[in-house]
């Protein structure tokens, strides 16, 4: 088992790793729309938040020697079910033809007042 940590993605604020690789499978912890360079929370539109989160996930994948087209499954937490269509639209533009298994879970609120949090499982 190997812990993945990159300075190009959000640094963990608690007792967890950015990602863990085990048997060439990468498990990426939940990511928020936080600028990895400045550490600023980016509370823009839901589309902007999703774009930032997916970008942060892509940085972690790159550090592990993987890429977005090797994502197997994603779990997306949204603060309101009304955001589903916008999240799906931005998500599909990011992945284009690749379609990982996915679940979207509506939650009343997310940490730091964000509208979306995403975790991922991929392979190396």
Image (cartoon, rainbow, N blue to C red):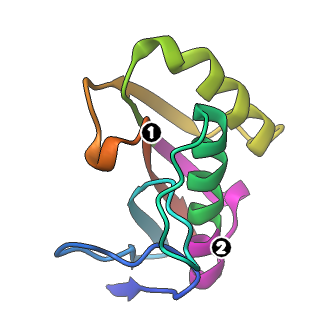
- Residue shown at 60%/71% (left/top)? 61
Label annotation for residue 67: none
Quadrant including the C terminus: bottom right
**Camera sees residue 107:** yes
Q: State how far apart marks 2 and 1 are (Cα).
A: 23 Å
Determine the secondary structure under disc 2. Answer: loop
Q: Quadrant of residue 80?
A: top left
**Camera sees residue 124:** no
Label 2 neighbour load within 10 Å: few <14, some 14-19, many 20+: some
- In the image, 106: left or right of 88? left
On whether residue 67 falls in the magenta region, the answer is: yes
Q: How many marks?
A: 2
Q: Quadrant of residue 96?
A: top right
Residue 47 screen position, x and y as percent: 66, 35
Label 1 neighbour load within 10 Å: few <14, some 14-19, many 20+: many
| The residue stretch that appears in magenta | 59-74
- In the image, 63: left or right of 121? right
- Residue shown at 76%/44% (left/top)? 94
- Residue shown at 31%/49% (left/top)? 112
Label annotation for residue 116: 1
Seen from the viewer's position, the closer of residues 21 and 57 is 57
Residue furthest toward the left? 15
Residue 14 screen position, x and y as percent: 20, 72
Seen from the viewer's position, the closer of residues 29 and 20 is 29
Q: Quadrant of residue 13?
A: bottom left
Q: Is residue 29 above or below residue 39?
A: above
Determine the secondary structure under disc 1. Answer: strand
- Residue shown at 32%/75% (left/top)? 12
Residue where numbered disc 2 is placed: 66
Residue 54 screen position, x and y as percent: 61, 53
Q: Is residue 20 above or below residue 73?
A: below
């Amino acid at each position: 088992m190997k812990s993945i940590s990159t300075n190009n993605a959000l640094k963990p604020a608690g007792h967890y790793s950015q990602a863990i690789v085990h048997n060439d499978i990468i498990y990426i912890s939940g990511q928020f729309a936080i600028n990895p360079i400045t550490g600023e929370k980016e509370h823009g539109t839901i589309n902007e938040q999703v774009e930032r989160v997916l970008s942060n996930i892509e940085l972690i994948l790159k550090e592990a020697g993987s890429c977005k087209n090797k994502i197997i499954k994603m779990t997306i937490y949204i603060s309101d079910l009304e955001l589903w269509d916008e999240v799906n639209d931005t998500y599909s533009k990011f992945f284009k033809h690749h379609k990982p298994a996915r679940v979207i879970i509506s939650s009343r609120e997310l940490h730091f007042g964000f509208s979306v949090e995403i975790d991922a499982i991929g392979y190396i």
